[in-house]
Image: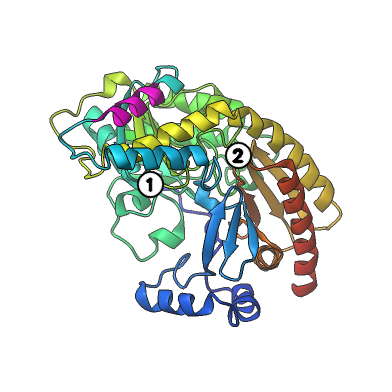
Amino acid sequence: MIKPHGHDASEGDVNSSEARLRYREDMIERSKARRLLSRDSEAFLHQSLSTPCLNAVISARGSRLVDADGRGLLDFHGNSAHQVGYGHPAVISAITRQMEELPFCPRRYTNEPAVRLAEELVRVTGGELGKVLLMPGGALAVGAAMKLARVATGRFKFLSMWGSFHGASLDAISVGGESVFRTGMGPLLPGCHLVHPCAPSSCQHGCGGPCSGRGARAIEDVLAREGDIAALIAEPIRCTTIEVPPRDYWARVRDACRRNGTLLIFDEIPIALGRTGRFFAYEHFGVVPDILVIGKGLGGGIIPQAAMLARADLDVAGHTALGHYTHEKSPVGSAAALATLGVIAEERLVERSAMLGAAWMTQLREALGSCGVLREVRGLGLLVGVELDAGSPARTGRLCDETLYQSLRRGLSFKVSDSRVLTLTPPLTVTREELCEATGILAEAVDAALGVVS
């Protein structure tokens, strides 16, 4: 197993930083949310990245949240679940109608919405992934994909990437590469190997400039050395630090998997459904995985809904249980997903994401170019990363954290990743005016943060 390089802070948005404490003192202590936050803290188990919570919200519509004091926030975080925005009327209507007609379906029965959703998901892959399993969450989909890979290959080992996130369940963190989820949780599943990803902004393979293919070669070496890896599970584009590999990277990895009898599983839970300017991110690279997992935005930002899609010839586990979840073929979840897919098609959100994202990245470069700490603006579609460099990892981390809370004060929410990247994922329904508003807030926030971070 190749060890991670340095401190892994891929999940940089923790709930214990100095900037967060100052934000709470300034914005929350005398707010209407204070009492609810106190009750929340008393009622829920505490954990990093969550409880104690940041604030309380009372409304979510379109691109915006409204907090308990009536302050509006452009939500460019959304836990990657708001591709069609919050509270889309078509999704709400479909859910409401389905709840009145058929609110639940016991697992041994089928229902029209679930079958239609499975058929539609096969259709949007062009039929190349011809079988579907529905389930109520992304981590469950990852677990089902791992089970299917074991059944189909007769092997138990997996290869994945440092810095990756595939869910917070024990099986998912075994193939995940973020230390905040792995530390202190061992022993994890046996046979899980990790390598450094192809990450052009922070290459750990020594390519030294333009990619020389060493990342793909590292995967080839592990697959050949082990000889019995069931599947490689990976994000085709790292969704937090927004790392886009060269186009030929995944083609080379795809070929290595074929040669070694290893299945290729793509985790597109946060980035499918048009986020990158293509319906699926893998389309950018001209490869098709053997198994695909999707979720988050599939439920329209309202209902938890996920799915695993697989090649039709991998339908080989009829003798065992891959999912077997109570809400496996949820008619309400399926109705939400069908409505979401309908909105994406009717409002041309895939094309819109590609067009708006390219223009917005140019705008961000122009607005932040003179701040003296901008390293890069990168991304695909409306999956955008703004990387800052303040001269040292520690100072950069403080600057990014302070920028987040300065932005929240001004009405913009996003994610900090790896203590160096401001990760911006607006709804695909976002307006040009909202993107301009976010750009202005971010420029002001970086400037204010530089005044705080010495």
Question: Residue at the location (63% across, 48% down)?
Answer: 202
Q: Look at the image and tell me whether residue 261 can be seen.
A: no
Q: Which residues are magenta?
A: 111-122
In this orientation, which residue lies closer to the viewer: 395 or 426? 426
**In the rendered image, the vertical position of residue 165 relative to residue 264, given as above or below:** below
**In the rendered image, the vertical position of residue 268 relative to residue 450, given as above or below:** above
> What amino acid type should be assigned to the residue bearing mark 2?
Leu
In this orientation, which residue lies closer to the viewer: 182 or 221? 182
Q: Look at the image and tell me whether residue 21 can be seen.
A: yes
Label 1 crowd bin: few (<14), some (14–19), many (20+), radius 10 Å: many
Q: What is the quadrant of the C terminus in the image?
A: bottom right
Question: Residue at the location (28% across, 19% down)?
Answer: 313
Residue 428's tag is: 2
**In the rendered image, the vertical position of residue 441 relative to residue 402, given as above or below:** above
* Residue 172 placement (x, y as % from top left): 35, 49
Kindly indicate whether the residue at mark 1 contacts the one at mark 2 (C-beta within 8 angstroms).
Answer: no
Question: Residue at the location (75% across, 68% down)?
Answer: 449
Dot 1 falls on a residue whose secondary structure is loop
347 sits to left or right of 79? right
**In the rendered image, the vertical position of residue 316 relative to residue 222, given as above or below:** above
- Residue at the right extreme of this rendering: 370
Q: Mark 1 — residue?
A: 304
Tell me the colour scheme of the image.
rainbow
Magenta-drawn stretch, dominant element (helix, strand or loop): helix
> What amino acid type should be assigned to the residue bearing mark 1?
Pro
Residue 453 lies in the magenta-colored region? no
* Mark pair 2, 1: CA separation: 19 Å
* Residue 235 placement (x, y as % from top left): 48, 39
199 sits to left or right of 254? right
Earlier residue among tags 2 and 1: 1
Which image quadrant is residue 98 in?
A: top left
